[in-house]
Amino acid sequence: MNPSSGYRGRLAPSPTGLLHIGHARTFWIAAQRCVEHRGTLILRNEDLDPQRSRLEFVRAMIEDLHWLGIRWSEGPDTGGGHGPYSQSERREQYLAAWRRLRAGGFLYPCYCSRKDLAQAASAPNDGDDELMYPGTCRNRADVADVADPAGVNWRFRVPDGETIEFRDLNLGSQRYFAGRDFGDFLVWRRDDVPAYQIAVVVDDALMRVTKVVRGADLLKSTARQILLIRALAGTSADCEIDVPTYFHCELVRDAAGVRLAKRRDALSIQQLREKGMTAEQVLKMAGCW
């Protein structure tokens, strides 16, 4: 790939299982849009979860993506000027963002257990994995000033009633209401692991990502991330963080209409390869053409 524009896209798989045809569709679209715009494509290894991330899945995802014909200019296997490209190696960047958000009054510690949250909310919002937080710890008075996030969950205080709007290049205008469509969300876990939302925002900003292509199940996360981007941009006069442009892909579903997921043992690219299918056949099966 010979980039000649300001377009910077990314592939961001998590090595917690084998890639399936849903990933093939999303990553193929991301790669093709980058080629069409003569941009730079980045591979980011989102291996934050120490319990589920495995090196064998890192190797498998790189092999599968290459087999599909996808190439990138920056990544954990190629290097580049905005690394490291594995999230497990980027703790200091996330910690710096946590400190800025904490100093700006955007975060608060949450002492609720999983059981507490399960009892307070009946189910996650539709298409979203995070329970609506009831605000139990939002206004606690006994909050100590700490320099390290370990030991408790840290939540972002959403501006209740604020409307977050953005235009998706594939799905059109989107609108979410903070405090109704989603509540105060996690940015740092009690086991001292940065949460998905803060890691993605920090990485996209520091890697100068301008275009984000991902699945439609992350539309609500986009609203959360826009709030984080605004908060971080407002914590320092010399901090320039632009909101990327988003393209959310329709999800690939199985015969029963259930979206494919690693945890449901969905058909993997590796299995299809072992059955003798070609990359073209897999991409056609994924609906890429």
Image (cartoon, rainbow, N blue to C red):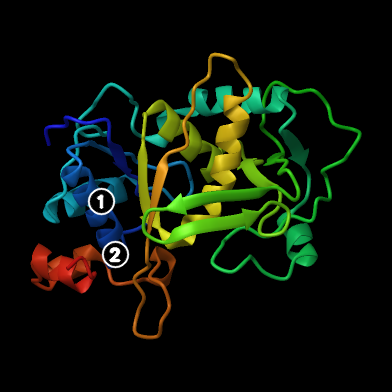
Instruction: Give the labeled residue for mark 1.
Output: 61
**Which image quarter is the N terminus in?**
top left
Instruction: Give the labeled residue for mark 2.
Output: 20
Q: Position of residue 164 (x, y in %)?
A: 61, 49
| 248 or 192: nearer the viewer | 248
Left or right relative to 102: residue 236: left
Dot 2, how many residues are within 10 Å of its Cα: few (below 14), some (14-19), or many (20+)? many
Tags 2 and 1 touching, CB below 8 Å: no
Task: Identify the residue at image location x=67%, y=25%.
Answer: 148
**Which is nearer the N-term, disc 2 or disc 1?**
2
Q: Position of residue 172 (x, y in %)?
A: 44, 59
Task: Specify the amino acid type for callout 2.
Answer: His
Task: Identify the residue at image location x=8%, y=67%.
Answer: 278
Residue farthest to the top, as pictured: 238
Dot 1, how many residues are within 10 Å of its Cα: few (below 14), some (14-19), or many (20+)? many
Q: Is residue 15 visible?
A: no
Task: Identify the residue at image location x=76%, y=48%.
Answer: 160
**SS class, disc 2:** loop
Q: Give the total of numbered labels.
A: 2
Task: Specify the amino acid type for callout 1.
Answer: Met
Task: Identify the residue at image location x=73%, y=41%.
Answer: 157
